[in-house]
């Protein structure tokens, strides 16, 4: 139960980071967009690990 809630929370954060990176790209802040994209990837990996219990 706790792992699936953590996975859901990190999946939501992944979506928020993608939206923030799109906004940063529109304002031509490429460094900030790169940080948000890396954070979104990290959140995606954490949510996969929380749901399935293995990495890659």
Image (cartoon, grey):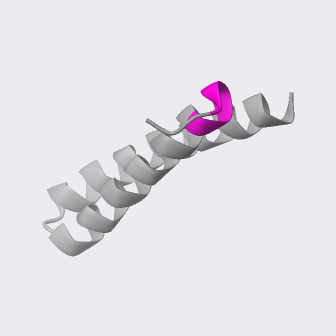
Q: Residue at x 45, y 52 (%)?
A: 42
Identity of the residue furthest to the left in this view: 28
What is the magenta range?
49-53
Above or below for 35 versus 54: below
Residue 29 visible from this viewpoint: no
Identity of the residue furthest to the right in this view: 1
Above or below for 32 versus 15: below
Residue 6 sits inside the magenta stretch: no
Instruction: State the image coordinates of residue 8 (x, y, percent, origin top left).
Output: 66, 32
Q: Residue at x 48, y 43 (%)?
A: 45
Above or below for 6 versus 17: above
Q: Quadrant of residue 11?
A: top right
Query: What secondary structure is the magenta-colored segment mainly?
Result: helix
Q: Residue at x 73, y 40 (%)?
A: 6
Q: Residue at x 16, y 68 (%)?
A: 30
Instruction: State the image coordinates of residue 35 (x, y, percent, origin top left).
Output: 33, 67
Q: Nearer the viewer, residue 56 or 22?
A: 56
Q: Quadrant of residue 4?
A: top right
Q: Nearer the viewer, residue 40 or 24?
A: 40
Query: Split into 4 quadrants, where in the image is the N terminus?
Result: top right
Query: Split into 4 quadrants, where in the image is the C terminus?
Result: top left
Q: Nearer the viewer, residue 20 or 1?
A: 1
């Amino acid at each position: 139960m706790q792992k699936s809630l953590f996975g859901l929370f990190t999946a939501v954060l992944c979506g928020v980071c993608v939206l923030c990176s799109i906004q940063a790209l529109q304002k031509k802040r490429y460094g900030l967009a790169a940080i948000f994209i890396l954070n979104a990837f990290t959140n995606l990996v954490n949510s996969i690990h929380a749901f399935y219990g293995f990495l890659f």
